Image (spheres, coloured by chain):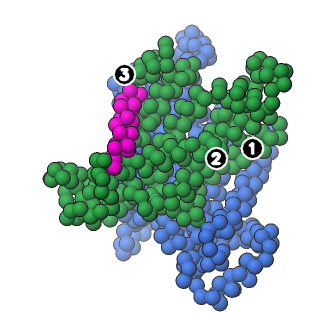
Chain colours: A green, B blue
Amino acid sequence: MGFMSRFAANKGALVGLVLLIALLAFAVLGPWLYPTSPWRMVARPFTAPFVTDRFLLGTDTLGRDVAAGLVHGTRISILIGFVSTLVALLIGVPLGALAGYFGGWIDDALMRITEFFQTIPSFALAIVLVAVLQPSIYSIVLAIGIVSWPPVARLVRGEVLSLRTREYVQAAITVGQSTLRIIFSQVLPNTVAPIIVMASLMVASAILLESSLSFLGLGDPNLMTWGYMVGAGRTRLMDAWWISFFPGVAIFLTVLALNLVGEGLNDALNPRLSRGRE
Amino acid sequence: MGMARFLASRLLKGVVVLFAIAVLNFFLIRAAPGDPAAVMAGEAGAADAQFLQQLREQFGLDRSIPYQLGVYLKGYATLDLGYSYRQQRSVAAVVGERLPATLLLTGAAFIISLALGSLLGILAAARAGRWSDSLITTAALVFYATPLFWIALMSQIVFALKLGWVPNVGYETIGAHYTGLARALDIASHLVLPALTLGLFFTALYARMMRASMLEIAGADFIKTARAKGLRPSVITRRHIARNAILPIVTLAGLQAGQLVGGAVLTETVFAWPGIGRLMFEALVQRDYAVLLGVFFVCSAMVVLFNIVTDLVYRVADPRIEAA
């Protein structure tokens, strides 16, 4: 079976893919759909949802359009999700490759550091990092990257450890290729499949992490994010449930879509490892 | 390796981790923009010049970094986590006061999620492919993707505010002055919603893990042997499959301890539960870095301790390791 048919065999993955494409469309088309700033007060505060056509999801405590906030938030969430995963990969892949390829004391030292970062409560560390560095899109991306790389390093280390002894790697060593070249051209390309699977799930957890930080008031103060919207609506929960409700649904759908796609990728890319499904 | 030696080596490792976190905290304070003395005192303006000078002298802030680090670590070694100038009390006292509530909440959430999650996982695996399996698997998938703070808010509005089944916020009824059993029940009624919402995510996680683990082990050779021997299916499921399938869950539970603490920050914030998670949120709002880093250190210490406990449990639970 080819990649596409294995992916398509997982119904959940297809649902996730459709959802994800819709969300990406919102992210890309956002500025055309809602050209005005989501911060602008456009109507009476506390307009209930599904009452007027212009403000389908209602307005918030200051009369800002909830739907506009959602659409603009899509861009931010997806952007932060992908970029912070990239940061985690940039830290985790080299460290894991070095540890796995060289072994010995290098491996020991790097794995101790990895374990250390895995032991620290990641959300608490992210809070402290963003608070100390001051909330901004950069500190958030950095913090999420810093708390998310350890599993990547462990995965890559394990893969490299087993690839290192393969004949084609031994052959590359014999013909005198440089170590860096061997790592980049012979070893790492063979670890791409499991890394892609892990990365898709990491984007999902990065989005959850970002929304949690924003909820606590640690979001970039210039950006309208889903987590911020949930947090901002929480004091008026009784009389205006929709302000907190819809952004939460958006987070849920995005994370669900990414998790489903991740599982589909896992089935498609690692057919041997796919979970015991009859 | 005997149990005592094992324990000693794990404790030593834990101390090393805590030492490294103390060093990390030291550098974090200095990474914050501005004068470290002002950072320690809280947001600028909270302290006068004379007071800042006193801080500089106390922590040797005008001396070399290694000297400052020495002073800082010496404090941590004696459980002196600094002083909160916002609250006019030592950080250790502030955190210590809030710790029991968090231990109660995370403990309850942990037990709920572990028991419920593995039970649901076993049920789903035993009925693999049937509708009850689909239901459990789908529910696990949904709750695994739902933001914790949002679930907390929504259950607060539905079960506490609209239906009025349980109290809305807090740890106990203020001004009621219950004692004994009445007080325990009062606290329990406040605990239900926060513990369930915090536990929900982990219930979903453990159910997924347990199901996968059960199905994997069900295909192992020693299970085929047990079947061939003619053991009853219920005995095989309980004594052979579940016993081994729980092992990855124990490991996972240890790894998740940090997440449980992180989740407590969100849950306690929503339900105004007076633990260290809520304290962390308050410290954020007040820019009280001393308390923030103190909570961070104590959270990490909790996780380190918990990891040691799960390692011990693993040794007892794993049929392949002889308990000494």
Residue pictured at 45% horizontal, 22% vertical: A7
Toward the viewer: B192 or B256? Answer: B256
Quick one: which residue is furthest to the bottom in this view? B50
Q: In what quadrant of the picture does the N terminus of chain B appear?
A: top right
Instruction: Give yes or no for contact between labels 3 and 2 (Cβ–Cβ under 8 Å).
Output: no
Q: Quadrant of residue A25?
A: top left
User: What amino acid is at disc 2?
Assistant: Gln
* Circle 1: element type: helix
Pointer 2: residues within 10 angstroms few (<14), some, or many (20+)? some
- Residue at mark 3 to residue at mark 1: CA–CA distance: 45 Å
Q: Residue A110's mark?
A: 1
The kind of secondary structure element at disc 3 is: loop
The residue where tag 2 is placed is A118
Location of residue B213 (image quadrant): top right
- Mark 3 or 1: in front is 1
Q: Residue A69, can we see it?
A: yes
> Dominant secondary structure of the magenta stretch?
helix
Position in image of residue A261 (x %, y %): 44, 31
The part of the chain drawn in magenta is A13-31
Question: Do pointers 3 and 1 mark residues of a single chain?
Answer: no
Q: Is residue B315 above or below residue B303?
A: above
Question: Callout 3: few (<14), some (14-19), or many (20+) C-alpha neighbours within 10 Å?
Answer: few
Residue type at numbered disc 3: Arg
Q: CA distance from mark 2 to mark 1?
A: 12 Å
Q: In the shown orientation, is residue A195 left or right of residue B149?
A: right
* Label of residue B130 in the image: 3
Chain name for mark 2: A
Rendered location of residue B301, percent (x, y): 65, 57
Tell me if residue A26 is in the magenta stretch.
yes
Residue B46: numbered disc: none
Evaluate if marks 3 and 1 touch, with contact meaning CB atoms under 8 Å apart: no
The residue type indicated by label 1 comes to Leu
